[in-house]
Every structure is written in C-alpha cells, then in structure tokens.
Amino acid sequence: MKRLTHALAMIGAIGLAIWTIGLVRFVATLPDEVADETTRTDAVVVFTGGADRLATGFALLKAEAAGRLFISGVGESLTLEALLQQLNLADYPKALRARVFLGHKATNTVQNAQETAEWCREEGIRSIRLVTASYHMKRSLLEFQRELPEIQVVQHPVFPLAVKQGQWWKYPGTLLLMTREYTKFVIANLAHMFGMTAGDFS
C-alpha cells in the first residue's frame, strides 16, 4: 500500500511539474505587442470580453485597417447604437456604421469562432485582423483555425491594464487568469486531438 501511495505521489508530482513548465512556456509565448500593424485585411473581428477590445476594433475600422468590422458575442438585445453609447462613441461616423456587423449567438470562445467562421463564409471574407486580449489569443486562434483553416489571420492583441503579463507570477489575479487560460488551452488542444469540441469555455 505504501509503495502504491508513493508511486501515485510521484506520478502526481511529475504531472504537476510538466503542467507548471507548460504554463510558464504558454505565458512566455503570448504576444507582447502588435507585430503587424499595417497589413490591411477584409475584416476586423473582435471577440467580446472587454471594452478595450471593442474600442480597438472601432478604431481599426476608422483607420481603414479593413473594409468591415464583425463583433462576435454581443448581447442578444444590444444594438449598434447602444453599444456605441456604452463606449462613448456616439459620434462615430455614420458612413462607417453600415460596415459594422454584430454577432449575437456566441457566449464562449468556441462559439465565437463558429459564429465568425459562418459570417466570413457568408461575406466571402478571406483575411481578418483578430482583436482579443493577449492572454486569450492562442486559444482564439486555435478554435478559429479549426473552423476556417484557409483564412489569413493577422493577430491584433490588446493588453488590459489589470493584466500584469510581464510579471504575471507576482500578481494573484493575473496568476489565476493565466492558470485558467492555460488549462482551457490544454483542454481545447486535447479535445481537438480526439475530434471533440472544447465545450463551454468563455
């Protein structure tokens, strides 16, 4: 019995060590800047989850970084006008508003990818600039490339002030965020490996 307990403890310790190494590597390879700010794409795509993502998406459309803007995961009853009011963008150019499309179906990252892929096919989109938080980018790309692998994706990460990415291990909130995101990323990879969906992960 003692040998079995010892063996299980060793397996657990090894598993924890591998998981911890993976976590460190995951955070170290997150984007820490927008590597490509100039390539124009057919559309800017925003996965909702923070005002900075939305504001960035609208700014990119205004700067003509793309021809259209698609926002996935917008509340079912939220209109474009109400969204602009929330973001203090009530004066957003009317000519650009016609180029903004809202997706109301998605409630998590898997559904964000599915909803966006469906819109891209309907609109004939062949390239996008994907806007989401830096810590969320790898999983977003994983899910989106599974849904629409042939599309060109330019990464446009945003960096919420509350997320201390550079020293993530020193801040409990950021440490928890990175731990959760890495765990979801691992589960998503395993799910794809076995031909399953990653489930309901936000």
Image (tube, grey):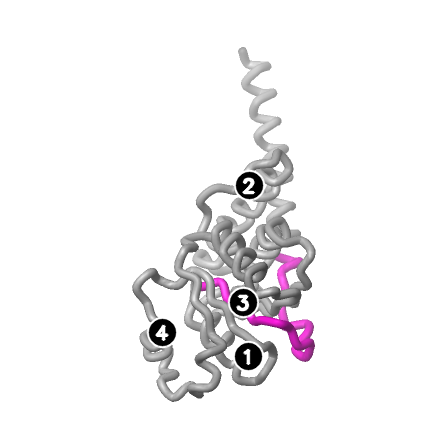
Q: Earlier in the sequence, mark 4 or mark 2?
A: 4
**Identity of the residue drawn at 56% across and 71% down:** 44
**Identity of the residue drawn at 52% across and 64% down:** 133
Distance from Cα at disc 4 to Cα at disc 3: 16 Å
Q: Which residues are magenta?
A: 27-48
Which secondary structure lies at badge 3?
A: strand
Name the residue nearer the viewer: 23 or 9.
Answer: 23
Distance from Cα at disc 4 to Cα at disc 2: 33 Å
Q: Earlier in the sequence, mark 3 or mark 1?
A: 3
The residue that label 3 is drawn on is 45
Distance from Cα at disc 3 to Cα at disc 1: 10 Å
The residue that label 2 is drawn on is 187
Residue type for callout 4: Leu
Residue type for callout 1: Leu
Q: Are marks 2 and 3 in contact (CB under 8 Å)?
A: no
Q: Position of residue 99 (x, y in %)?
A: 49, 77
Query: Is disc 1 surrounded by few (<14), some (14 to 19) or many (20+) residues within 10 Å?
Result: many
Name the residue nearer the viewer: 167 or 77.
Answer: 77
Label drawn at residue 83: 4
Quarter of the image for residue 129 reads: bottom right
Which secondary structure lies at badge 1?
A: helix
